[in-house]
Amino acid sequence: MNIQSSALSLKPLGCLPGLALLALAAAALAQPPVEPPPNAPATVEWNAPTGRLSLRYHGGVLLEATVRAEDTAGRAVAGVEIKLDPTVITGEKIEQRLTFTPTKPQAGAQLVLRGTVAGSAEAFSAETESEAQKRFPLVRNSVGLSRSLRNNAVYDRRWDWVLTGPADGATRIEPQPAGPPGVAFAWESHGPTLELTFRPRFYQKHREIKYFTPWTYKPWEGSLTGYCTWWSYKGGFSQATLDALLKVFVAKHLPDFGYDYMQFDNCYQIGNGSHPTNWLTWNKGKYPLGWQHAMKTIRDAGMKPGIWVHRVHRPNDPHVKKVGEEHPEWFVQTSDGKIMQYSGFYALNTHNKDAVAAMIRPLYRGLKEQGWEYVKVDGAGDLLSAYNNKNAAEFFKKIGKTTAETWRVWDEVARQELGTNIFLLTCWGVGPGVNSIGLADACRLGSDGFGTGEFQHFNSWNGVVWRNDPDHCDVLGQYYMDNDALMPVFGAKAPVPAKSVIRPALCSMAGGMLMVSDKVEVYQDDLNLEGMKRSAPVLFTVPGQLYDYSGRKPGSYGVNLNGGEPTWWQLEIDRPFDHWSVLARFQWGQKQGDKHVFEYQGLPEGKVAFADLGLASDREYLVFEFWTQKFLGKSKGAFTAPAMDANTGMQAFAIREARPHPWVLSTTRHISQGGVSLERLTWDTATNTLAGKSKVIKDDPYVLTVHLPAGFKLKSAEVTGEKAETANQSETATVRIIPSATKTVEWKLAFTK
């Protein structure tokens, strides 16, 4: 590692009135779209007399700013010369630091940097680890751009660079309406001294994610929600089971709620030898009419077909045995020329073109031709373990290849054959999964079974590297859950199993995959569906933190909770008509002795400071709890989260800035409380009218809860094509409809004052 001074280009910057946001954002994307960004520092232009600063990187302007000394009232302080000390740490992890100090400090004066950062359309603001996380630890992510006051960095996913300023409230970053093709951010940092840090190839080099080249691909942004056959039925799922399941899903309108995919898992194929014939030929005993009929029934139910395949070639399968006899050179061999067997299977030599052409390429080409829209590829851990075997290591050394190169070919071929429009999931944890980065759209973060801690281990990866998959989320699963807790939920005729709420809701809050996997009879009981209905679809999110809540290195499999599961998860939602947060509070079961039994102990009420959530402390906020449908009032500075008893699995608080007129507090469609259902929201002062558009589900009661500032009352409600029930409370009003169809409705609420 070498630390050196950065060469400065002392060019006059000229006047920058208003900092042309649109021009800056466009300039950031002026380079060819596939040209890799350099692993090099930015070019710095600094004019000390005027305090003008410019950073240029990868053919565009990254930052335009001014630095000056100001008093506490924000007035310029004359006579303070500002010195820039630039340093660059070279090597693989380039780190460029710009340190600004006053040569003659004055009492009551501080340095202030103001400017604009320009990034690609994939740039977003986030935070680095600081005292703020120690004061109030939580997991943060956002739907759209974040405005959190905890943010002190801009990360551009497209080009994998990050610009960081002082943390813990010393930097304010505000997204600007720059429009395509990029995003601009107003930036302000203050302090007795200031330091900016620029890191190129941030996730790839600094986070040590070798194959992360985001300029070559984009993350899958659609909702990844549906059903996986494996956990409840293992290999026992058949066409009859599919028909029964789809009948229930349709009757309960679950596809309308967002359960899009129906994925077969190890229940349809002939044999299990990973020969293409095994996967492309269906078991006639379980599926008499084959994959064509299964796929048709799925699409007729309004869902998309998904399928599971494996990577290991087992010689007890006749197809694989024959290939091994005829083409032993297609597999990893021992020093005596025999096919290496590891845990009862052969390991394919993916550097043999004939082997790839016969054993990998036809499978994925065939799946695409059949029409599958979702492909889950299992066995990554099995294959990686085989490739890391001593015999395999010697084999690859002789041919001049590495384990990672060998492994990665598999998914390169799969992606080539499937194309980019078919969702591709890799399995068996992030350890082997790192070899699929840039090829797979998602990664199962652990081994079999829903992992409540998996999201927190890799929260900064979701929406950046890939989409996180915690594995099949059986809503009545037991791990870390209180099996006896029955939680009251609005609209339900009786308390529902708390775990059936908390498990899908966690997936939704984390922005990851939500593939349920229970037996048919579980979905026949409406009390098991409330958590599912309110958690789907899963909105696409980007991380609010450029670090993991309790991270594990990519090669680590062991559970490392680092203090336990996070209690607090915050989801920011940015829409053209509103910006709000949903703060979830989870209660995790405490293990009872040595048995795999967990119980809720209850949680006391807790004071939550708005500043700890990245919200301004000088204004009032409205807080509404989703599952109890209770308005907690208007607060400034902090609000009190009610105590949770031994039956309450979670709380979900919508936090919106108070307005002087009626405004939506919450909707019952989804845990985001407007993020899924609301499409438009406007207030007309002249007529005291609140109007909007909402997406609703057939037969699912839809309730709008509106805040009533002092003096306002709801007079009437009109909803296109539906009968509306209205009610006024002391501080809120509600409008309730029971939709006659799944559709979008327009509504208008009139108020008196």
Image (cartoon, grey):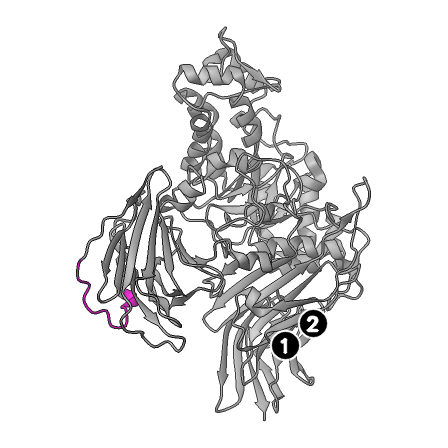
Answer left or right for 173 relative to 624.
Answer: left
The magenta span reads 11-22
Q: Where residue 597 appears, x then y in whole percent?
A: 80, 45
Please tell me how crowded label 1 is: few (under 14), some (14-19), or many (20+) other residues with Cα within 10 Å. many
Decide: is 725 above or below 359.
Answer: below
Q: How many numbered markers are drawn?
A: 2
Pick the front one: 571 or 728: 571
Pick the front one: 517 or 289: 517
Pick the front one: 679 or 195: 195
- Please tell me in which quadrant of the rendered image residue 586 appears: bottom right
Answer left or right for 335 relative to 76.
Answer: right
Q: Where residue 170 appears, x then y in whole percent?
A: 44, 64
Whether the residues at callouts 1 and 2 have beta carbons within 8 Å, the answer is yes
Q: Could you tell me which residue is drawn at 47 percent across and 63 percent down?
A: 146
> What's the distance in space between the residues labelled 1 and 2, CA to CA?
9 Å
> For the residue marked with disc 2, what is the amino acid?
Gln
User: What residue did someone put label 2 on?
Assistant: 629
Point out the image quarter for the C terminus.
Answer: bottom right
Answer left or right for 502 relative to 377.
Answer: right
Residue 331 visible, this angle: no
User: What residue did someone put label 1 on?
Assistant: 705
Decide: is 236 above or below 316.
Answer: below
Point out the image quarter for the N terminus.
Answer: top left
Q: Main secondary structure of the magenta part?
A: loop
Is residue 707 rendered magenta in the image?
A: no
Q: Where residue 637 appears, x then y in whole percent?
A: 59, 74
Secondary structure state at the residue bearing disc 2: loop
